[in-house]
Amino acid sequence: AALRLLEPVDADPAAGLHDILMNTGLTFPLGTARLFHDFVLRWAPAPLPLKEQIFREQPDVADRFYSALRNAASYLDLHYHSQVAFLYKTHDQDLFVRYRLRGRDAEQESGHVDRSKLVKGQDFVPRQRGDFRATNFLREGFRQAVLQGAARYVLSAQFRPWTDPAGNPRTLDCSTAWDDTAYPWMDIGYLNLRTMVDANTRGSAGWQLLAA
């Protein structure tokens, strides 16, 4: 999921103020960009047996990877997380922020995968026997929900006062969840989607590394 924040007046959808990219899974499999880069260089070109071996060597990475896979009946049933923290500077304090987006009726996320049905080392959920739905059923279901005014979301955030990451590197560790007792999720906005944007606008969202 991608959320684009726009100027409040005369906004150009293709040039937003801030893009927030989110994925399923509370945390990212790897904690830093360097670890992810090194992992992908080895894992991406590897044949399936080697991928399985890599996951056996790094069971914590495998656990976070598989815990993010979903086999949902609708995009509206999913919870999306920014996984990375963004730094915001206000007039009186600096804050790290993480985001979550969920369907308004999906307080509990569905679509969790039975790992016994996964092919070890594979990075997707295989189609189950007897599933004859179209390959684009999720996208088409979402489009219909938007056109019918049923695509309603809740945007939540965790706020954490800035501290020097050098003193607590796990603050920015993408593979570590923040304690939701110390940093509770707070609902900050409601989204009602009514219009499908064009492909060029959808494809222009991206990571803003200076903010993340």
Image (spheres, rainbow, N blue to C red):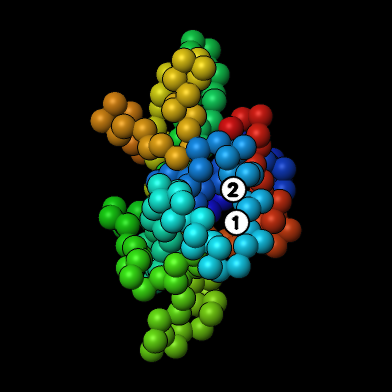
Q: 108 or 24: nearer the eye?
A: 24
Can residue 76 be seen here? The reply is no
186 w.r.t. 50: above or below:
above
Residue that appears at 72% across and 43% down: 15
Residue 18: name its quadrant.
Answer: top right
| Label 1 sits on residue | 43
Residue that appears at 50% across and 20% down: 165
Residue 104: name its quadrant.
Answer: bottom left
| Quadrant position of the C terminus in the picture | top right
Q: Position of residue 13 (x, y in %)?
A: 68, 48
Helix, strand or loop status at disc 1:
helix
Q: Position of residue 98 (x, y in %)?
A: 45, 35
| Label 2 sits on residue | 39
Q: Position of residue 140 (x, y in %)?
A: 52, 74
Helix, strand or loop status at disc 2:
helix
The residue type indicated by label 1 comes to: Trp
94 w.r.t. 198: above or below:
above
Can residue 93 be seen here? The reply is yes
Is there a contact, CB below 8 Å, between mark 2 and mark 1? yes
Q: In the picture provided, is 172 more to the left or to the right than 206?
A: left
**Mark 2 → mark 1, Cα distance in angstroms:** 6 Å
Disc ID at residue 69: none
Q: 174 or 34: nearer the eye?
A: 34
Residue that appears at 66% across and 56% down: 202
The residue type indicated by label 2 comes to: Phe
